[in-house]
Image: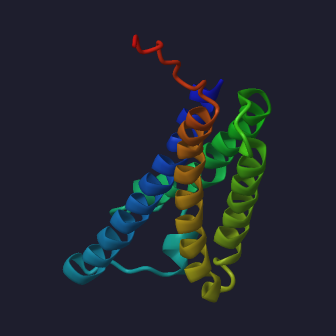
Amino acid sequence: MKKAYSILAYLLAAEVVINGMAMAYAIAAVFRWVEEDGGVINKALLDADSPDFPGIGAFMLHGMNGMMVIPLLAVALLVVSFFAKVTGGTRRAAVLLGLVVLQVVLGLSAHGVSALAPLHVLNAFGIFVMAILTARSVATTSAAHAPAATQAPVPV
């Protein structure tokens, strides 16, 4: 179970990176579309049932990862933490779940209050760091509880 705990935490960190990369691509693609192709972002585009502009898939990936995949990983990590017997593991998993919930709230709220967008990014860094520390805590915990090596008596 410790291995599953570690893998889930690393997957959570990887998903945060993927989400950031998707958003960076989406924004760059939209700017290129506007600057070079004369694309227009207006209410009609945003209200369209299937808007067609470069980067739409990356925006969708960011939304699906952030609203479904990452929260699911955080919940799975919390459940596994109860069985993994990692010192402080459940606390770390609960903190991560709390940060993920905050991330979803910030992401949805930033649509109406754009000043929250920097907090959304900052919190993503927090999730990434906490996920890495959580995954690495398994090795630290295992090393601390490893039995001491016994030495054979040295003949005199």
Q: Position of residue 134 (x, y in %)?
A: 60, 48
Q: Quadrant of residue 106?
A: bottom right
**Residue 56 seen:** no
Picture residue at 31% right of the left edge, 78% below the top: 31
Q: Quadrant of residue 126?
A: bottom right
Nearer to the camera, 129 or 28: 129
Q: Is 55 drawn above or below residue 120 in the view shown?
A: above
Picture residue at 78% right of the left edge, 50% below the top: 91
Image quadrant where one finds the C terminus: top left
Tell which residue pokes out farthest to the left in this image.
Answer: 36
Q: Is 127 drawn above or below residue 118 in the view shown?
A: above
Nearer to the camera, 80 or 55: 80
* Colouring scheme, one of rainbow, by chain, secondary structure, one colour: rainbow
Picture residue at 34% right of the left edge, 64% below the top: 25
Q: Is residue 30 left or right of residue 89?
A: left
Q: Position of residue 69 (x, y in %)?
A: 60, 43
Picture residue at 66% right of the left edge, 23% below the top: 1
Q: Position of residue 45 (x, y in %)?
A: 49, 72
Q: Is 77 drawn above or below residue 131 in the view shown?
A: above
Q: Is residue 82 left or right of residue 4?
A: right
Q: Is residue 152 left or right of residue 35?
A: right
Q: Is 62 drawn above or below residue 73 in the view shown?
A: below
**Residue 140 seen:** yes
